[in-house]
Amino acid sequence: MFYYGIIALFLLFLASTSLKIIRPYEKGLIERLGKFHREAQPGLQFIIPFLDRLIKVDMRERVIDVPPQEVITKDNVIVTVDAVIYYEVTESFRVIYNVNNFEIAAIKLAQTNLRNVIGELELDQTLTSREMINTRLREVLDEATDKWGVKVTRVEIKKIDPPNDIMEAMSKQMKAERMKRAAVLEAEGYKQAAILRAEGDKRSAILKAEGQAESVKRVAEAQKYKYEVEAKGQAQAIINVFNAIHEGKPTKDLLTVKYLEALKDIANGNASKLFIPYDVVGVLGSVATIFEAKADIENKNQNIKGNREE
């Protein structure tokens, strides 16, 4: 029984060392007697104990944190740069056999290229051109790591820190720029307001003058229309009176009486002027004739009255 137990333990040991499980995000490299034998796919794999060795390679995208380092810009300013690298393995064979330690190699390569890229830029360009720096670093690293079976997907600059004195100077410069911009904007505002105010006053004066001119024009037209209507009415009234007089066929005596009544109305007024008829002699003759006729009528009336009394 003892020997059977030992045999069972030995078989169990062989099974545990010969059966390997590779996860879906992994690939396996099997070495036999120190030489590359084959590439193993995800799933259950069988190897020969003591002869084969399984190396698992993670194929997922991973990130490398590049330690902060001091870099000198083109205008001799020392800045501290911190970056991260995102990469994924494309060929498991190359990443194991073509480079000893990919992560350390990628960090050193990134630090070297950071110095090269930022060394070609001035401080202001370095602070405002992060996207350009990221793109150039990714291209350089991707080209260098292609032979290692790795693809660099992204490179991101986490921060760029200039020295404290440079930061203070930049802060003062930004403050001065903001104050200058505010002063310019305020002056522009005052200028624009003055222009708009002057334009408004000008427009108001023009509209007021146009309104007054239109008002005078309307009043003049109204007065003109009034005079025209009154003149037409008076003319029509004269025509109507003239026609009525001629249609009535008045006698000379009646016209004389109407003329005297008109003179009476003129005399009752407060005017200090004296109106003398044009045909004085004719009028006076007519007046005398009227009085004579009136006297004769009165005498006749008295005679008739006396005859009645007798």
Image: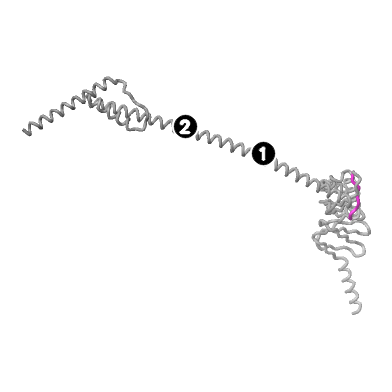
Q: Residue at image x 92%, y 55%?
A: 100
Query: Mark 1 = which residue?
Result: 195
Image coords of residue 290 (percent x, y) = 21, 25
Quarter of the image where the N terminus is located:
bottom right
Main secondary structure along the magenta-highlighted residues: strand
Image coords of residue 147 (percent x, y) = 88, 49
Image coords of residue 138 (percent x, y) = 84, 48
Quarter of the image where the C terminus is located:
top left
> Is any part of residue 98 visible from this angle?
no
Type of amino acid at the residue the image marks with label 1: Ile
Query: Mark 2 = which residue?
Result: 220
Q: Is residue 12 above or below residue 175?
A: below
**Residue 73 within the magenta-colored segment of the rendering:** yes
Q: Which residues are magenta?
A: 67-74
Tag 1 secondary structure = helix
Mark 2 nearby-residue class (10 Å; few <14, some 14–19, many ≥20): few
